[in-house]
Image (cartoon, rainbow, N blue to C red):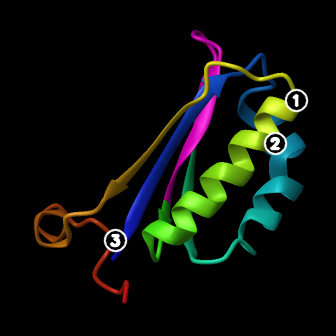
Amino acid sequence: MPTILQVHFPFEGPFGKAMTDAMAPLAQSINDEPGLLWKIWTEDPEKKRAGGVYLFTSQENAEAYCKMHTARLQDLGVTDIDAQILAANEPLSAINNGPLGSVR
């Protein structure tokens, strides 16, 4: 079942293009995570928060990535990590053009 992982945390920057330049190698490596279908990167320079919304093929893959990613952030000294794992409602998402139809 498609599973969404939302992760947000305090982040001092960089943001915008500087974030893109700094994080491109990390973004590429995330593509290799088991069961990852996509990630949307999020940032809020005013509130100094960043993170992402991920779609995984299964809850197990989302949980494994969440555990690894949370530990990585904590190793960098990040606290106040907000991570949630949620099931995707495919029929309702399809009504709103959610990109879940090809997930199997």
Q: What is the number of the mark on residue 46?
A: none
The structure residue drawn at horizontal position 57% and vertical position 10%, both measured from the top left corner, is 47
Q: Is residue 52 magenta?
A: yes
Residue to which mark 2 is pinned: 72
Q: Is residue 63 above or below residue 48?
A: below
Kind of element beneath mark 3: loop
Task: Classify 10 Å Cα crowding around label 3: few (below 14), some (14-19), many (20 and above).
Answer: few
Q: In the depicted view, which residue is nearer to us: 27 or 4?
A: 4
User: In which quadrant will I find the C terminus?
Assistant: bottom left
Residue to which mark 1 is pinned: 76
Relative to 77, 1 lies left or right: left
The structure residue drawn at horizontal position 66% and vertical position 50%, both measured from the top left corner, is 67
Q: CA distance from mark 1 to mark 3?
A: 33 Å
The structure residue drawn at horizontal position 61% and vertical position 19%, both measured from the top left corner, is 80
Residue to which mark 3 is pinned: 99
Residue 73 in the image, given as x and y percentages of width and height: 78, 35
Kind of element beneath mark 1: loop
Residue 89 in the image, given as x and y percentages of width and height: 19, 64
The amino acid pointed to by label 2 is Arg
Q: From which residue to which does the magenta span run?
A: 43-54
The amino acid pointed to by label 3 is Pro
Q: Answer yes or no: do the residues labelled 1 and 2 have beta carbons within 8 Å?
A: yes
Residue 21 in the image, given as x and y percentages of width and height: 87, 44
Task: Classify 10 Å Cα crowding around label 2: few (below 14), some (14-19), many (20 and above).
Answer: few
Instruction: Judge depth for marks 3 and 2 and give the one in front.
Output: 2
Q: Answer yes or no: do the residues labelled 3 and 2 have beta carbons within 8 Å?
A: no
